[in-house]
Image (cartoon, coloured by chain):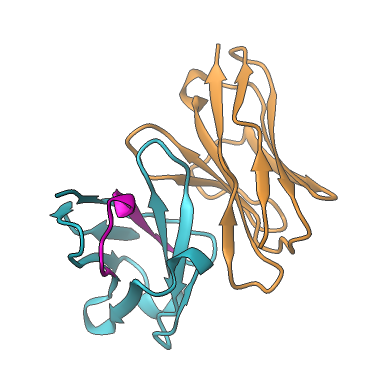
Amino acid sequence: SSELTQDPTVSVALGQTVTITCQVDTVRSDYPGWFQQKPGQAPVLVIYGKNNRRPSGIPGRFSGSRSANTLSLTIFGAQAEDEADYYCYSRDRYGNQVVFGGGTKLTVL
Amino acid sequence: QVQLIQSASELKKPGASVKISCKSSGYTFTDYSIGWVRQAPGQGLEWVGWINTNTGIPTFAQDFRGRFVLSLDTSVTTTFLQISSLMAEDTAMYFCGRGDFLDYWGQGTLVAVSS
């Protein structure tokens, strides 16, 4: 099965830029995405698709990219409200099974 | 506006069954699949499976085949997740989400399994 590997914790100083990464094994990632989850809340989609689109309402400081087997979520000028857990997500090579990364807890200092 | 509203929390004994629901509104129900995600206390997200709202055909992650059933009632734009032979390890928040990208989520349903 496919594996998506994330660093468990990442920190960033307020107003600085941070990148959260997700290592993808040999999975096909035509449907990559990133979710933000704050305590006690449902996840929120922040980046989706091959073209790393932002859903409406997601601030422009959130940006997604991919290089080889790494998906990346970059937050430019992190704000206090960006402190949350972030999960990457993708479909497996057959396009049927969905896989989540283990999650990264982002702390804004 | 798009909304997914889930049924209330459930407390069940081991061995029992539970059926939770996810009602969709604000869009054409059959245009998007509905996915289900499990989150155990303090843990990450696990994909349970999804159901094609046109055909009613479900697809499950490997770990959720057997005791988990997905169904739908198109007339009331609602999907259902049923879990049988409940175990303590099934205690979790269960979320539904819309479409390939899970762009909208329900608020979650807590299923607690305890004797």
Chain shaded cyan:
B
Image-based side of B22 in relation to B32, left or right: left
Report the residue at 66% width, 65% height from top. Answer: A92
Res B107 seen here: no
Q: Position of residue B61 (x, y in %)?
A: 51, 67
Question: On the rendered image, what quadrant is the C terminus of chain A found in?
Answer: top right
Instruction: Find the magenta span and give its range.
Output: B83-98
Chain A: give its colour.
orange
Image-based side of A97 in relation to B91, left or right: right
A62, above or below A11, in the image? below
Q: Position of residue B115 (x, y in %)?
A: 14, 49
Q: Where, by quadrant of the figure, is residue A14 drawn?
A: top right
Q: Position of residue B75 (x, y in %)?
A: 23, 83
Q: In terms of depth relative to the viewer, which is nearer, B15 or B34?
A: B15
Question: On the rendered image, what quadrant is the N terminus of chain A found in?
Answer: bottom right
Picture mark count? 0
Report the residue at 26% width, 70% height from top. Answer: B84
Q: Is residue A3 magenta?
A: no
Q: Where, by quadrant of the figure, is residue B33 drawn?
A: bottom left
Q: Is residue B89 magenta?
A: yes
Report the residue at 15% width, 56% height from top. Answer: B12
Q: In terms of depth relative to the viewer, which is nearer, B66 or A99?
A: B66
Residue reaching furthest to the right: A68
Q: Position of residue B28 (x, y in %)?
A: 37, 75
Image-based side of B76 in relation to B27, left or right: left
B115, above or below B5, in the image? above
Res B14 seen here: yes
Report the residue at 67% width, 26% height from top. Answer: A76
